[in-house]
Image: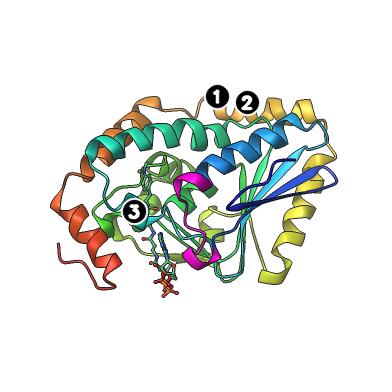
């Protein structure tokens, strides 16, 4: 079994658990972690014992606090678009179209690319201390990993637009009310709940599960929307707002737009 730098891969009966382990950065997604998520999912795909995958973050403070801001701080428009393209296709679309169900077990902050990771997953459950948001516009960016498309699909346009345009976070009870998550549990019971949900899926026919996923996702691909998101996302990197937003974060102050 392969070992990873920023990921733990464990199996229990029919379930593989992928834990993102960058606690000092609140499990922020850097390029290596994204690559490792894909590799771990390929490993779970080739293992015929595995019927369901759980993705979670290490510790109780964060699922994933977004893409790693320090890593993309110096990107230009071309790099931004290229990376959005690669990331959307090889990670986020791959997760959405994965032939086995993926449960995002959200412990703490699920922000930006972290929320987008959860949105691409099949279902989402969360601990009562979880917080959800797409803070990109506060950095002079827009969601670049499918968030502009998947969030409205899951919670409706009005609520999604409010979240994206204010960059405000919502808590677990509001997320449950919005249908963004399907269950809220105590923090120390989250993984147990995720396993119970996984077992309820895993007892069924694996090939039928794959067919349900295929049928449900067949019509949910508005490719033009995703392509436009990539273009607009890339263009953000050449703006002075992006430089101000990211510099302000790195200097620990509020941005002035
Ligand atoms: N990236 C890197 N480091 C992060 C981080 C992030 N997203 N979030 C937190 N950290 C780091 C902090 O810098 C801090 O590090 P040290 O200063 O200790 O070295 C450590 O984690 C603990 O964070 P805080 O001290 O800030 O903890 P607090 O409890 O005070 O606040 C917080 C927690 C989650 C509210 C806060 O950390 C926060 O606002 N974090 C940033 C949230 C955010 O804006 N996330 C990014 C959203 S934008 C791309 C595609 C998509 C994207 C990017 C590129 N390409 C295709 C190129 C997506 C972008 C996003 O996700």
Q: Which mark is residue 164?
A: 3
At 56% from the left and 35% from the top, the residue drawn is: 96
Q: Which residue is mark 1?
A: 218
Instruction: Find the magenta span and give its range.
Output: 23-33
Q: Is residue 51 magenta?
A: no
Viewer-side residue, 254 vs 6: 6
Element at label 2? helix
Vertical placement of residue 85 versus 159, above or below: above
Res. 20 image quadrant: bottom right
Is 90 on the left or on the right of 144, as rendered? right
Vertical placement of residue 207 versus 56, above or below: above
Badge 1 vs badge 2, beta-carbon distance below 8 Å: yes
Distance in Å between CA atoms under marks 1 and 2: 6 Å
Distance in Å between CA atoms under marks 1 and 3: 26 Å
Q: Which mark is residue 155?
A: none
- Image spot of residue 184 (x, y percent): 64, 64
Element at label 1? helix
Q: Earlier in the sequence, mark 3 or mark 2?
A: 3
Res. 44 image quadrant: top right
User: Which part of the image, by quadrant, shows the C terminus?
Assistant: bottom left
Distance in Å between CA atoms under marks 3 and 2: 28 Å
- Image spot of residue 152 (x, y percent): 42, 44
Mark 1 Cα shell of 10 Å, populated few (<14), some (14-19), many (≥20) = few
Q: Which mark is residue 214?
A: 2
């Amino acid at each position: 079994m392969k070992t990873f730098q920023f990921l733990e891969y464990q199996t229990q009966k029919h379930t593989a658990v992928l834990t993102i382990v960058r606690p000092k950065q609140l499990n922020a997604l850097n390029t290596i972690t994204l690559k490792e998520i894909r590799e771990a999912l390929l490993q779970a795909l080739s293992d015929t014992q595995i019927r369901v995958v759980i993705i979670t973050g290490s510790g109780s403070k964060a699922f994933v606090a977004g893409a790693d801001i320090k890593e993309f701080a110096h990107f230009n428009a071309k790099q931004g678009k290229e990376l959005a393209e690669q990331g959307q296709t090889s990670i986020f679309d791959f997760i959405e179209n994965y032939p086995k169900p993926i449960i995002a077990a959200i412990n703490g902050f699920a922000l930006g690319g972290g929320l987008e990771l959860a949105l691409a997953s099949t279902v989402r459950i969360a601990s009562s201390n979880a917080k959800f948001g797409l803070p990109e516009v506060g950095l002079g960016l827009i969601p670049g990993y499918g968030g502009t498309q998947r969030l409205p699909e899951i919670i409706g346009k009005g609520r999604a637009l409010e979240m994206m345009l204010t960059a405000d976070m919502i808590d677990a009870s509001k997320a449950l009310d919005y249908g963004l998550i399907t269950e809220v549990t105590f923090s120390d019971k989250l993984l147990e709940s995720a396993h119970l949900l996984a077992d309820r899926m895993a007892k069924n026919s694996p090939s039928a599960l794959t067919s349900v996923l295929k049928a449900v996702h067949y019509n949910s691909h508005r490719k033009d929307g995703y392509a436009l998101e990539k273009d607009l996302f890339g263009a953000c990197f050449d703006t002075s707002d992006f430089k101000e937003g990211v510099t302000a974060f790195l200097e620990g102050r509020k941005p002035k737009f």
